[in-house]
Image (cartoon, grey):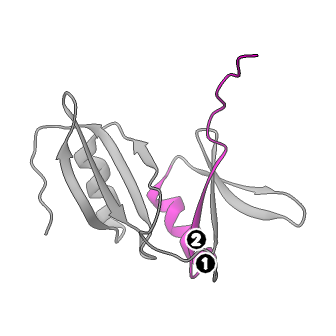
Amino acid sequence: MKSTPLPIAAVMVHVADAEAALRWYERAFPDAVRVSIGTPAFECLSLFGVLLEIVPAEEKVGSGAFGSVVYWNVESFEAALGHFQSLGATLYRGPMQIEGEERMCQVRDPWGNCIGLRGPSSGRRQCAP
């Protein structure tokens, strides 16, 4: 029996202050909608069918740039990078040119977690500080 791949269900982000991070991620991803799931109710963000679950860091899973990075497709690479930096995200890796006119980079949220951005370039060159 051949199985059909299922889409990503959720991305879990571990932070020191879950409520502050939830508010930050709402501003970072303005298309996200805050939703309550489960019993007891757990608030997270829904972004194009993917749940962005902001949870407290703990002993087993801390906050920071230590593991997998989810890359989000963006309409304009430079605009998205500027948007995240305006919210206090810091450039961590890149930007780098990839196939075609695409660029990619990683930024770190205020809790040290990496967010990958990938999209078409407008032609302006961005440099890491």
Nearest to the observer: residue 4 or residue 11: 4
Residue 94 position in % (x across, y down) = 21, 55
Residue at disc 2, secondary structure: strand
Point out the tag, 1 or 2, that comes first from the N-terminus: 2
Residue 85 position in % (x across, y down) = 29, 64
Disc assigned to residue 57: 1
Q: Amino acid at mark 1?
A: Ala
Residue 59 left/right relative to 126 = right
Residue 66 left/right relative to 59 = left
Residue 41 left/right relative to 114 = right
Image-quadrant location for residue 122: top left
Residue 28 position in % (x across, y down) = 45, 59
105 to 110, vertically: above or below: above
Residue at disc 1, secondary structure: loop
Disc assigned to residue 14: 2
- Of the 4 image quadrants, the one containing the C terminus is bottom left
16 to 91, vertically: above or below: below
Q: Amino acid at mark 2?
A: His
Residue 65 position in % (x across, y down) = 41, 69
**Magenta-colored span:** 1-30
Q: Residue at x 48, y 53 (%)?
A: 29
Q: Are marks 1 and 2 in contact (CB under 8 Å)?
A: yes
